[in-house]
């Protein structure tokens, strides 16, 4: 029994996420390629996002070409409402320039979470189109379509990046390490199950 608990604890502490690109800033002053960030699960990132509070993985900045994000983790809860479970996700996006200042990305994602009596499955498609007005201004449109109707229990209220989204954003970047973004979107979340 102790061996199983130790193994589960080690897996929980070491929950790797693999990215298929090197880490670099989203905006590069000498580049016309620019896209809004995604979550590590391949869904449209928005702020404030409660998922970022519970995940150490942060944003997924795309580079031109094929991008992949894979994650797997083991979860253990201790105390009065103790439970355990597993989660995994896979996302693949293809990104490129359509014109010197026009960038696009399209792809799909799949997520699975099993924790105690609760399960959440979501699979969908994501697409983005971004126009770089100049070195400081970007305008983007995005859509995320869930192919499933994910079942979300009230205990999973923090899963706020699932469901259908359509929207637009404008971003001002005075430097490569700082930006301000205004986004407007329609988000159709699944109705929580009781």
Image (cartoon, rainbow, N blue to C red):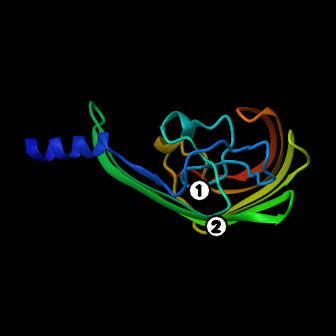
Q: Where in the figure is residue 19, as x and y percent of width and height?
A: 50, 54
Q: Quadrant of residue 75?
A: top left
In percent of the image, x 48 and y 37: which residue is there? 56
Horizontal side of 189 relative to 4 (left or right) equals right
Image quadrant occupied by the N terminus: top left
Question: SS at mark 1?
Answer: loop
- Is any atom of residue 181 visible in this view? yes
Towards the viewer: 149 or 109:
109
Residue furthest out toward the front: 30
In percent of the image, x 55 and y 37: which residue is there? 52
In percent of the image, x 56 and y 45: which residue is there? 23
Could you classify mark 2 by the number of other residues whose Cα lies within 10 Å: few (under 14), some (14-19), or many (20 or more)? Answer: some
Towards the viewer: 49 or 129:
129
Mark 2 or mark 1: name the one nearer the start of the chain: 1
Q: Where in the figure is residue 135, as x and y percent of width and height?
A: 86, 42
Q: Where in the figure is residue 117, as x and y percent of width and height?
A: 35, 52
Mark count: 2
- Is any atom of residue 116 visible in this view? no
Towards the viewer: 132 or 42:
132
Could you classify mark 1 by the number of other residues whose Cα lies within 10 Å: few (under 14), some (14-19), or many (20 or more)? Answer: many
- Which residue in the protein does label 2 denote? 107
174 is higher (above) or lower (below) than 90: above
Q: Where in the figure is residue 74, as x and y percent of width and height?
A: 32, 48
Q: Quadrant of residue 77?
A: top left
Horizontal side of 182 relative to 79 (left or right) equals right
- Which residue in the protein does label 1 denote? 42
Marks 2 and 1 in Cβ contact (< 8 Å):
yes
């Amino acid at each position: 029994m102790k061996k199983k608990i130790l193994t589960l604890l080690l897996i929980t502490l070491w929950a790797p996420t693999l990215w298929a690109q090197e880490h670099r800033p989203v905006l590069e002053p000498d580049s016309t390629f620019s896209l809004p960030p995604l979550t590590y699960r391949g869904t449209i990132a928005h702020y404030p996002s409660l998922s970022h509070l519970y995940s150490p993985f942060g944003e997924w900045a795309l580079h031109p070409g094929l991008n992949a994000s894979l994650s797997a983790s083991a979860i253990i809860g201790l105390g009065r409402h103790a439970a355990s479970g597993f989660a995994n996700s896979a996302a693949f996006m293809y990104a490129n320039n359509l014109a010197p200042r026009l960038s696009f990305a399209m792809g799909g994602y799949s997520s699975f979470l099993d924790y105690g009596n609760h399960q959440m499955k979501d699979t969908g498609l994501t697409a983005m189109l971004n126009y770089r007005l100049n070195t400081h201004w970007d305008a983007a449109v995005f859509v995320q379509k869930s192919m499933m109707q994910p079942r979300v229990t009230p205990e999973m209220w923090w899963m706020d990046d699932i469901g259908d989204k359509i929207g637009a954003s404008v971003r001002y970047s005075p430097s490569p390490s700082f930006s301000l973004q205004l986004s407007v979107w329609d988000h159709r979340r699944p109705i929580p199950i009781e």
